[in-house]
Amino acid sequence: MKLTSPVIIENAHDDSIWTATWTPAPEDSAPILLTGSLDETVRLWDPKKDSCIRTNTGHCLGVVSVAANPSCRMAASASIDSFIRVFDVASNNTIATLEAPPSEVWQLQFNPEGYNLSCSWRWQCLSQAVGYS
């Protein structure tokens, strides 16, 4: 297997990037790269153009985990502010804000069907139904 040269985007965020994930590829477009940073933002990237599509804001402290659901309609971000934000990938609108106990949430993952979001912190984990009503 031959590896290609990496693409490096300078100044992709205003602070350290702690997390990244790919959305699944929708039928009619390419996958999107999501990155989360200590600058309190999630950025969505077009890998073909190496450019930022949009920036999702709303956390008060750094973002440490991002997850995308299998349909590519929703994504979620967890921050050391103890909040999880679920947002619409296309519109960037917030779908839900979940508050964890007063400790940091370190990991997020959607289930294979895409409507349960699991998160973990310290010695606990939680699974929460999320989605459109």
Image: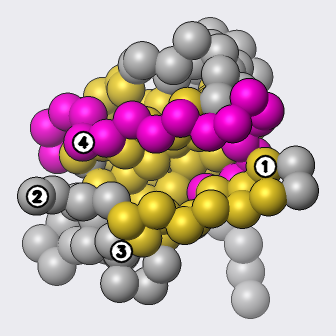
Q: Which residue is mark 1?
A: 121
Q: Is residue 76 above or below residue 38?
A: below
Of the 4 image quadrants, the one containing the C terminus is bottom left
Q: Looking at this rendering, what residue extends furthest in the front direction? A: 101
Asked whether 70 or 84 is in front, the reply is 84
Answer whether residue 112 is visible to the viewer in this image: yes
Q: Quadrant of residue 86?
A: top left
Q: Which residue is mark 2?
A: 133
The kind of residue on which mark 1 rests is Trp
Of the 4 image quadrants, the one containing the N terminus is bottom right
Q: Which residue is mark 4?
A: 95
User: Which comes before the other along the chain, label 3 or label 2?
Assistant: 3
For the residues marked 1 and 4, what is the alpha-carbon distance in whole angstroms? 22 Å
In the rendered structure, which segment of residues is drawn in magenta? 90-108
* Horizontal side of residue 86 vs 35, given as left or right: left
The kind of residue on which mark 2 rests is Ser
- In reply to whether residue 106 is colored magenta, the answer given is yes
Tell me the element at label 4.
strand
| CA neighbours of label 2 inside 10 A, class few (<14), some (14 to 19), many (20+) | few
Find residue 4 and name its label: none
Tell me the element at label 2.
loop
For the residues marked 3 and 1, what is the alpha-carbon distance in whole angstroms? 21 Å
